[in-house]
Image (cartoon, coloured by chain):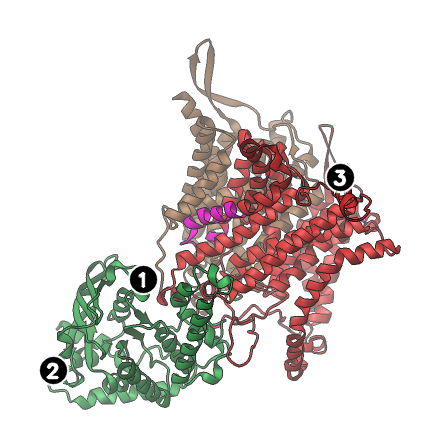
Amino acid sequence: MEYFLQQLINGLTLGSIYGLIAIGYTMVYGIIGMINFAHGDVFMVGSMTTFIVLLMLGVTGGSGPFIIVLALALVIAISMAVAATFNWAIERVAYRPLRGSFRLAPLISAIGMSIVLQEFVRIAQEGRAKPIQPIIIGKKILMTKVVGNQDFNVTLSYMQMIIILSTLVLMTVFTFIIQRTSLGRAQRACEQDTKMASLLGINVDRTISITFILGAVLAAFAGFMFFMYYNVTDFFVGFNAGIKAFTAAVLGGIGSIPGAMLGGLLIGFIEVMWSAYFSIEYKDVAAFTILVLVLIFMPQGLLGKPEVEKI
Amino acid sequence: MMRIWENNPELEVIHLTMRFGGLTAIGDLSFNIARKQITALIGPNGAGKTTVFNCITGFYKPTEGMLKLTHEDGKTFLLERMDDFMVNRVAHVARTFQNIRLFAGMTVVENLMVAQHNALMNASGFTIGALFGSKGYKRADAEAIENSKYWLDKVGLMNRADDPAGDLSYGAQRRLEIARAMCTKPRLLCLDEPAAGLNPRESDELNKLLLSIRDDHGVAIILIEHDMSVVMGISDHIVVLDYGRKIADGTPDEIKSDPAVIRAYLGVEDEDAPVEILKEAAAMHRAELREAGNTKTKPTKPVLTAKKPIAKKAVRK
Amino acid sequence: MSAPVKSGSGGFETKILSNAQIAKDLFYTALITFPILVPIVAIRTQLDQGVLTWHSRFWLASCLALAVVIARGLMHFLVWNPRAAASLDVSASAKPTSAKRLSLSDRIGPYVSRGLLIFGLLLPIVAHLGHAIGIELPSFGELRLVDLATYILIYVMLGWGLNVVVGLAGLLDLGYVAFYAVGAYSYALLSTVYFPRWFGTGVVPFAFYITMPIAGLLAACWGVILGFPVLRLRGDYLAIVTLAFGEIIRLVLINWFSFTQGPQGINVPKLTFFGLKFKDEPGGFADFVSTHFFPLAYNRVQGYIFLYYVILAMALATYFITKKLRRLPIGRAWEALREDEIACRSLGINTTNTKLTAFAIGAMFGGFSGSFFAARQGFVSPESFVYIESALILAIVVLGGLGSQIGIVFSAVAIMGSFEIFREMDFMKAVLPTGTEPIQFRMLFVGLAMVLMMRFRPRGFVTKREPTVYLKEKKAISGDLVAEGHG
């Protein structure tokens, strides 16, 4: 039971990260009906930027709390700005000129863009993984159970606490943006019918650009948390995280933002539980299998709407 | 007039019901389609005509009801239990689509060859025989080409045989789609608005083509059509739908004077509404189509159905 | 679906911009380029013996940013400028003559494939003769050339295999490398473990000839197994599921240690000349020829040339089988499926079987090339079957022109050849920052090529579709009309 509880906390942490990336997938899919294949790599850019800026600032776990908070705020801001620029530029360069082209074109372009991003970072920052010492150290022991002559502690690290809480805050802000602001309204209108929206005076290009920027901001935050949690990153982390987040988006029902978050949490739980109780080697296989099963058996996801084939 | 469709029909639609979620697209619909006759399925937009087609051709599985197809040799098929492609392959029901579905990037003759897939596939010995150049396949291939030529000639597309189907004019695309359906050697041909977007001359040619398919090939035709000149000109039997239910069923003459039909179409309660109104509406419809000419835009709202909101009120009164 | 889809044209929107507007645009370009380049390029982090260090490379970032701004400026003045565009845009002014040009390309069309065939057949001989009389490409020895040609042909064959699935049937498969892996591992496991166990070690020299067909069949079975669940999926979903399948197979190959020996890979017997090894030993190929026919000294190149001809024969078989299949009902059904699946079903075509045969035949060709790959390398490991390989093969098919077999040859030569050129570009090292090799840029180049190709020539090198049957006259069909399938 205690072991399970610990895994639940771990799953919640991982799931939060997946959920934030998944929102980017789901929003873009909702608005232009394509998988932004490069989205996972935008997440990678976020985590890489976090790493670079942290290294430059030279913050370590030993620095004072005030300095750490200040530095992290700076890091978050820079990562978000960088990732947002990347995603904006991707949409501008690789997707926008292809609107109205044949259906495979943007998808192939996206695959190409994903390769470009990975290779860009790999060449610029060499291929090896970049580890640093953890900066936010410390944890809270929630429960202790004596197993034989050893104690098993259910712990919640401060980093996990930060991840879960900030995801909650971000989600709230985000839901507000989508539901209450004119931007969100424009976005939902474009999701329904792009042509009609533009006839009604909505600047569709701008709305799509903003969607990409918002997605990138969330992905960058996920990248930041990913790096702070695992303390390591490389040019390829976006691939696996991207597929899992996409699985989350589909599991939750593509196009649905609460669905993406829910899907992210589920995927996080499943991955953690699989690693904890079955085999850690096959955790990715488990995640990919879920992707396959979900797409085949319930492509509309948990909170999505079924699509009717029009004849 | 004798109601020929009542005895030994080609297709019996029995208590057909189709619901999408809470919406009942077709409710308890029963009618028959006679052998070697042209049956028209008419009704205002949204009456469920295309849904009936999709049920007959296996694309939709009806919620309730039965679709019983009987060939002349007595073989019966329950279409609602068959996969869509089996409806064509085994039960020999072919169809066209409201928004033309040709293989636009393939040539006209390729379109017709694809339609003869099953015959050729059998002759090709699971492809392996044909891969090694079996004689049987070569013969079948030559026959298929001859058959394609016959139909190209019939629909007047012989000189366009090697052009991509996507390059054809709208009317030619409609005719090619019919030729393609006929290449599957059907016993029942379902045409979804074959005259939509055709000019009067093309419309007349279409009439001739359909009559020839009926008389020379002995194929039963069921067509959905808004163009009353086509409907009244060539059909032997008309079924009228409104809101997914049958409101009339009879010969063209019976339908012309059926008060329920006039109500549904024109929204007037006058029981003695002259046939002229119906004819006039048909003429207006055709004029509109003529304006649309040969362009690929389909008239979105034929005049006949423009009065539907009134019809709704009138019927509900 | 039926209405012809307008392809995203490569034409530019031309707008007259004042110089001030252009300056503003360039300023924004610089502003956008800044965050893209600054942290990631300008700060170079290094991990040396566990110690992380960093140094700034602002000069490099500035140079790149400047390059981007200049490139955009040039675009403004040369391409997006209506006046310049009018003089540059040949196609607009040369409309009347384009028909003539087209017929010319149609006329030489058949000769291109014949020329390629003859070139392919003669390549090693020419290289060998050139070598004998002392003509050699700089740093491109005879060995290298034949080996490179072999390597390219593997990708040509993979491209042709994937072309059946993506180009003809219109099903976007991002996990094609899985079948390549199945072929390679089938050969590896059968020839090293199972055949010796079942039939004794005597069969090992002949293993390739016995296992290659089996490998192809096994791959085809996997094509059906993986194809079955994805029948209902289309477009992006199909792409991502096939990608997941590819990854699952690779992960299983890595982790199922007892079966595949995991990441350390398997050493497998190399290809033999029907049992004769290409080795300088009694009983080797050269020795055998010398004793039975004519004196022949051992030379490493003999093995390479034989490998080349084997893959050439396999690739040609793929080419001709696919070409023939296109003209048979099954091939027409694939293309019809790509054009309109619903219409196919209305014509009595079993789309399930049609899709599965496409998957199976595409996978079978992948399996054949996989077994050849293993026999050429003498070694297989999961590392060779990563996702990026699938993307590379897809890039070859896409750049060649979906559905066009000749186009795939050109794009495979272009991509794989350019890799080789990257390897040779020593002069680039002077320009590049230390520690960067030109070869590292090859995948970046492939990615960029995919993006640019989609933007400027989305139909690939060869855009025309050749009809499979004609009554009077064979007319090539413009790519704009050909549907791309739903993925």
Q: How far across and down, in percent of the image, does residue C176 sit? A: 55, 49
Asked whether the residues under the numbered discs 1 and 2 touch, taking CB atoms below 8 Å apart as contact, a structural biologist would say no
Q: In the figure, what tint was chain C given?
A: red
Gap in Å between the C-alphas at discs 1 and 2? 34 Å
Which label lies toward us, 2 or 3?
Answer: 3
C244 w.r.t. C121: above or below: above
Q: Which mark is residue C51?
A: none
Which is nearer the N-term, disc 1 or disc 2? 2
Q: Is residue C42 visible?
A: yes
Q: How far across and down, in percent of the image, does residue A283 sit? A: 49, 34
The number of numbered discs placed on residues in the rendered structure image is 3
Tell me what residue is drawn at x 75 percent, y 39 percent.
C279
Q: In the figure, what tint was chain A given?
A: brown
Q: Which residue lies under the disc numbered 2?
A: B2
> Which residues are the magenta region?
C216-239
Residue type, mark 3 in image: Lys
Circles 1 and 3 on the same chain:
no
| Image mark 2: chain | B
Q: Which residue lies under the disc numbered 3?
A: C279
Residue C217 belongs to magenta span: yes
Q: How far across and down, in percent of the image, does residue A114 sit? A: 60, 50
Q: Secondary structure at mark 2?
A: loop
For label 3, the crowd category at 10 Å Cα-Cα, with few meaning under 14, some 14 to 19 and many 20 or more, is some
Residue B51 belongs to magenta span: no
Query: Which quadrant of the rendered structure holds the N terminus of chain C?
Result: bottom left
Left or right: A76, with B269 as reference point: right
Q: Which residue lies under the disc numbered 1?
A: B86
Please identify the dominant SS of the magenta region: helix
Tell me what residue is drawn at x 62 percent, y 50 percent.
A115
Q: In the figure, what tint was chain B given?
A: green
Gap in Å between the C-alphas at discs 2 and 3? 91 Å
